[in-house]
Image (cartoon, rainbow, N blue to C red):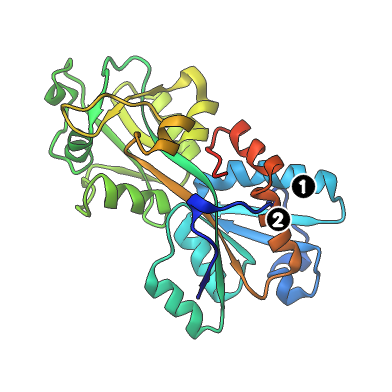
Amino acid sequence: MKKLTPWWKSAAACLFAAAAILTASCSRPASQSGDSMSVMIKGSDTMVHLVNAWAEAYMTAHPEASISVTGGGSGTGIAALINGTTDICMASRDMKTEEFDLAAKQGVEVIEHSVALDGLAMVVNPANPVENVTLEQLGSIFTGEYTDWQDLGLPAEKIVLLSRESSSGTFVFFREHVLHDKDYSNDALFLPATSTIVQQVAEDKGAIGYVGLGYAESAGDKLKVVPVKKDADSPAMLPNSETVKSGEYSIARPLHLYVQKSAPALAEEFVAYCLSPEGQAIATEAGYVRVD
């Protein structure tokens, strides 16, 4: 197991990746296929938008490079990295000790790169009159203790809970940091993609969900982002680059790229691009928070 400098001290440079459906020869990682200019990337749905933006810019400058990016969730990406079916994993959570141990048993040495920060935006339908929520209230909502918006002193409306599936790093992060490892409500709808949460919230007055900051910004007035308070006596905070980077916004985390040490040199070159001034500017433009 090998890690780079912690995310809050990072200062390297790279792009990364995305785009396109890869050719049939890329059904396995480039490190196995022998094509040093092809890289496969898989994992966090939260990061797909960002990595695609990096990939498009990188492949425009380097047309000889071929980069494939697919989502499926952080857990799915980590499993693919361990079993050797992807060169790079996108993860919106830290790899667990047991995952590093399993990788080592498989002979896969993993390098961690923290390439951006993200704030989880709590989103509701624009017609919802809620002004802010505390972390405690969010816990009560997502564990099913609160089932109607009137439990928060609002007009009666059944709460419709929307969450990512358990393979998602965002699912895991939210359960650990907001639900304090309690189970989600049995009434929660577990959806396969962040874009589906955006669509459902935009259509349902009673819905509430969590999405990455970039998705919230892209959705514009289709969604209402709800300010979050650490507790009843704290100020309500919206997620943005300043509040996420300062730690004032409660629901924030680093975003990682995990790379096989045996991956093509192109993989590390991408990561270097992501962490470069140009790559970090792209992260900002895409609605994420830069780490430099």
Look at the image and tell me in which quarter the C terminus lies: top right
Q: Mark 1 falls on what kind of element?
A: helix
Pick the residue in front: 272 or 173: 272
Residue 122's place in the image compared with 48, above or below, is: above
Residue 74 numbered mark, or none? none
Give the vertical position of 103 relative to 213 (above or below): below
- What amino acid is at disc 1? Tyr
Q: Is residue 25 left or right of residue 287?
A: right
Q: Residue at x 43, y 59 (%)?
A: 94
Q: Is residue 75 above or below residue 287?
A: below
Q: Earlier in the sequence, mark 1 or mark 2?
A: 1
Residue 151 location (% of width, % of height): 12, 26
Q: Are marks 1 and 2 in contact (CB under 8 Å)?
A: yes
> Whole-Å distance between the Cαs marked 1 and 2?
8 Å
- When asked about the image quadrant of residue 257, the answer is bottom right
Q: Which residue is mark 2?
A: 270
Q: Residue at x 19, y 44 (%)?
A: 143
Give the residue at mark 1. 58
Dot 2 falls on a residue whose secondary structure is: helix
